[in-house]
Amino acid sequence: MKRALAIAFLIATVAVANAALPVAGRSGAVFEIQAGPQLLVQFSHAEQALELLAERGWNVRDLRVRLAQDPYDATLAPVDVLLPSSLPLEDQFFLLVQGVVRKNLGESQLAGELSDLVAAHMAPPSSRLRQRWEAAFQAALWAGEIERTALLELLWRNFKEDGVRAAKSLDDVWRMVESRSNPEGVASALWDVALAALLAPQKLGWSVGPWAGASAPALAGDAAFRFVVPQVKFVALQPEGDGVAVLPGRLTRSAARLVLFYEDGRFDTLELEPGQEGKTSFWGVKAVLLGVLSLPGEAQASFAVRELRDYPVRLGAVDLVAEGDSWQLSWEVESQEEVDAYVVEVWAVAEDGGKIVDRQLIPTAGVGPALLAWSSEARPQPSQLRVYALTQQGVLARLFTTPVLDFSGEKQAPYTPEQ
């Protein structure tokens, strides 16, 4: 009680003298107090915050904290933490945690990033500085920075303050994170953090919304699939898949995910394995996000979003004419985007329902309206014709399937109304 009265007296003296006076806090920190209307509340809040930090293992003794009415007074000596009284208390808490952690980390290469990380996780969600950090995290991650975003977040979630204090470099962070899992497990965990930060940040306890660049309804400019490292190609001519992703076999330290956005706002993720085809149907899918993450050595992330409505082709009329053993298929293209060629698959009846007997490539200019045609004379008679568009980025999109009516009574291969 006596100490509280003494502090109140000192603060009152400061207010009268309009000067900065040092006050020793219970935690061992030294406060420099300038006159202001909320000094007593500000001082009490800072004291409690420092006691909390000390309990969590941070050294706060001899820390110099200035409670400043005028934070831009160049005549005053520098301090470890400057708390402008104009800021809300939750933002002052963010700055105090940030300053304490930065001083404790000393010459660490990651002192800046880690002090921001700890401050953001300890500050309340209402802190504007925390929200600004969350948005900056999303922007950096979307731009390809994986080590100083998702990797550090994973460090915090696995090791808390002990991991932060032990991390002197990114190599230290990788070693600690990999000590908990194999490389495949680390890649999966990094993807969980990255996709949550971009698509569902509330799962991380954040207050910001999903990253605007990862949403699909309104895409401006160039939304083509392009990647930094490594390259991922959509090139596969598989009959059952509307879109197939193939990863080159060299991606031994990399991981990729395909995110499917549905019309109702839900999304699913598909893990893509190196050297293996990952298949998914695009039926009912509004947009896809393809992300590639490379681990130590090239640690980068790359993301691209493509809206699927009318991409890459908006179709008009489709006609099929059969005469004897010849068939002619024509289709009207009202618009096309980045299309290199069209692929026509000829299916015939087989014991298991159907098989591909021919596949032909039809080149196209790739832009503007067009009328395309395909004809064939072959046996056995086809039961279905399937048409795909192959884009410049390697996306293979199924456009339509046409049954060939057989009036001779032969069995037709099964198909669905959706096809």
Image (tube, rainbow, N blue to C red):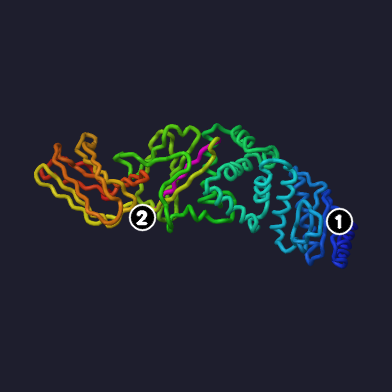
Residue under pointer 1: 22
Which three-letter amino acid code belongs to the residue tagged 1? Pro
Seen at 68% across and 38% down, the residue is 168
80 vs 181, nearest the viewer: 80
Q: Where is residue 327 in the image (x, y as percent from the top left)?
A: 14, 45
Residue holding disc 2: 309
Tell me which label, 2 or 1, sits earlier in the chain: 1
Name the secondary structure under disc 1: strand
Q: Which residue is drawn at 78% across and 44% down?
A: 59
Q: Which x, y percent locates residue 357?
A: 21, 36
Question: Is label 2 in a helix, a strand or a loop?
Answer: loop
Q: Looking at the image, is 201 positioned above or below residue 16?
A: above
Q: Which amino acid does label 2 sit on?
A: Arg
Question: Which residue is drawn at the image coordinates 76% and 57% (left, top)?
Answer: 45
Q: Where is residue 173 in the image (x, y as percent from the top left)?
A: 63, 37
Residue 270 is inside the magenta segment: no
Is 173 positioned to the left or the right of 107 in the image?
A: left
> Vertically, is 319 above or below 190?
below
Tell me: 417 left or right of 275: left
Magenta stretch bounds: 286-296
